[in-house]
Amino acid sequence: MPILVMGEQWGDMILDGHKSIELRGKKNVKHANARVKVGVKGQCKGEVTVGGCFMYESDEQFRADVSKHRWNGDLKSVGYAEVWGWHLHKPEREKESAYQLARGCIGPFSLNHTWD
C-alpha cells in the first residue's frame, strides 16, 4: 500500500477528520481514489482515501478552502509553483507501525515496506 508522508500536525488533523484537502506541488494521477497510509516521522499512524485533485488558481479560491486544507497563508506562501489540492476521505487511525522509505525515493509514495 502506498504512503503519504507529512508533518505530524497535518497527519493528526487528517486522521482526526479536521483536514480534508492535502496541499501538494503535483497533480495526483497515480493514486487517485486509492487507500494510502498516513506517515509521520517514520511511523504509519493510519489510513485515508485519496480522491480526485484540482489546482488552485487564485488566492480567493485558496482562502475559500482554508477550513479544508488548514493553511493559514496565501497561495504563494505554500511554496509550490503550482498548488494542488488532493481530496481526502474516510480517515482511520490505527496502531502505529514503523516504515522505511526506499533509498533515494522521490515523491510521497515510494516505500520499502509491505503491509498485509
Image (tube, grey):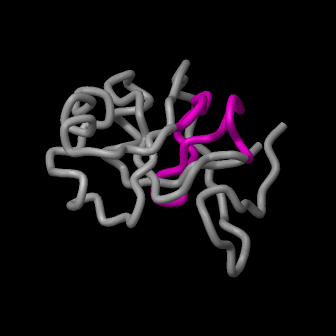
Considering every residue shown, the one lying at the far left of the view is 73
Considering every residue shown, the one lying at the far bottom of the view is 104
Q: Residue at x 50, y 30 (%)?
A: 87
- In the rendering, at what x and y percent does residue 56 appear? 37, 44
Q: Residue at x 42, y 59 (%)?
A: 82
- In the rendering, at what x and y percent does residue 102 appear? 73, 71
Q: Residue 64's image quarter?
A: top left
Residue 59 vs 18, above or below: the answer is below
Q: Quadrant of the N terminus?
A: top right
Count the labels in the image. 0
Q: Residue 59's image quarter?
A: top left
Residue 78 vs 56, above or below: the answer is below
Observer-nearest residue: 16 or 55? 55
Q: Residue at x 44, y 41 (%)?
A: 85
Considering every residue shown, the one lying at the far front of the view is 57
Q: Residue 35's image quarter?
A: top right
Q: Is residue 101 located in the magenta-colored stretch of the structure?
A: no
Span shown in magenta: 30-53
The secondary structure making up most of the magenta span is: strand
Left-right relation of 115 to 89: right
Q: Residue at x 31, y 66 (%)?
A: 79
Left-right relation of 102 to 41: right
- In the rendering, at what x and y percent does residue 81 appear? 39, 66
Q: Quadrant of the C terminus?
A: top right
Residue 32 vs 71, above or below: the answer is above
- In the rendering, at what x and y percent does residue 17 appear? 38, 22
Observer-nearest residue: 30 or 96? 30
